[in-house]
Image: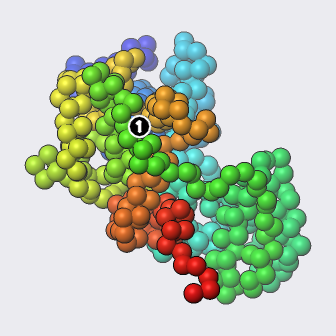
Amino acid sequence: MANKRFRRTEIHSGSRLPSKGLAADLAVIHGDFTDYLRARNYASLTIDHYQRHLARVAGWLHEQRHRPALHGLTRRIVPRLLVQVLPRHSPETRMNYRKALFHWLRFKGRYSEPVVRPWAPWLSGYLHFLRTHQGVGQSTVDLNEANAKAFMEWQFGTRQANWSLVQPADIWSFARHHVRGVRPTTGKSRLGYVRRFLRFVHLKGACGPQLAAAIPKVAVGGGPRRPEVLTSQQRRKLLASFKRTTSEGKRNYAMTLCMLDLGLRAGEVIGLRLQDIDWPARRLTIPVTKTGRGRQLPLPAHILEALRDYIKTGRPQNGPCNQVFLRHPRRTGCPLSRGVLKAMVRLAYRHCGFPPSWSGTHRLRHTFASRLHQRGVDMKPIADLLGHRRLDSTNLYTQVDIEALRRLAQPWPW
């Protein structure tokens, strides 16, 4: 009966208007909560699933007057609540609803019971420093928070943070515990976040530089940090590999151009909306994503023509989604996921006969930045086009043509 009563209040049903409380919850679900998920680069299809799951639970809760509203839920009561909302559904279905509700609780700051540690101001001050002065994106802030919090829990527990008592031996003991059982690359990353936190503590004058210096460095073998960029010949070969007589080929060609000649991230490509393209002004608006800032990019003629060709002759029309790039041919009209985009690029690499180790989309973004740098463009304009707030981040994307430099070298001695 609860499920039947709920059907009258579903967001897509026109038989009954939702109550003011329910309407307010639905507005947050499709507004701030959706922006929260997009800022964390969740696929549009996943966001749509979470929206529908939360709308259903919100409607059921408003039918049950003795239950707390959606904004009053806590993590502890979610599993029992879903058994009542979905009594005849499979555990897998309830798991999907639980994911949506847990993301909602994180968004509302109610995922875990608030336990305030005496050292919490150090952590909050560090996160404020990262956001305000370092321009760090939210996903990186989350990683810094997790690792810095792990160190504070290990070192101080429920006590006040007394940095004068922390010794390098304590740092080594924590490092062994923190990287136990993980791969070297993961261990190096974890300790790097802790090292940056200790440098912040030193910057505040609470400890000396020896604590950050005591963080051991993890040796990681393998290739270079930066991916090898495409040559001019490889770039032409990659673009020519797409069959632009099919809808899927037109879509793949336009998406690749956006990464290769505009420097967009994979998440920015799949997040593009129709209203982001200003056709008369030949301009593309990139919504706020990883770095917490959006940007506007000029659209060269060849990219503008590729977008127009796909939207007019290849993109499914009259669909429910306003994303530019949609699925073909399976689940036609549904938003793309990051996995589908990466699989497309990987298949194109194989078709062109590129090295077997090539698999990522970030290689195209690196190629864009390196080509601009080789043509004499300064670092600041490149950083603006890439959406970077720090020039040292842009420096990782610009690679120098070593062979070209060798031709400029003078014989020694003169």
Residue type highlighted by circle 1: Lys
Residue at numbered disc 1? 237
Task: Residue at the far left: name it.
Answer: 280
Could you tell me residue 35's position as x and y percent? Answer: 37, 47
The residue lying toward the viewer, choosing from 163 and 357, is: 357
Q: Residue at x 28, y 36 (%)?
A: 324
Q: Residue at x 43, y 13 (%)?
A: 1
Q: Residue at x 86, y 67 (%)?
A: 172
In screen coordinates, is 261 left or right of 392?
left
Task: Classify 7 as above or below 352.
Answer: above
In the image, residue 47 lies at what x, y percent?
42, 35
Quadrant in which the C terminus is drawn: bottom right
Location of residue 268 with respect to 325 vertically, above or below: below
Residue 138 image position (x, y, % from top left): 50, 57
Report the residue at 26% width, 57% height from top. 296
Q: Nearer the viewer, residue 407 or 310?
A: 407
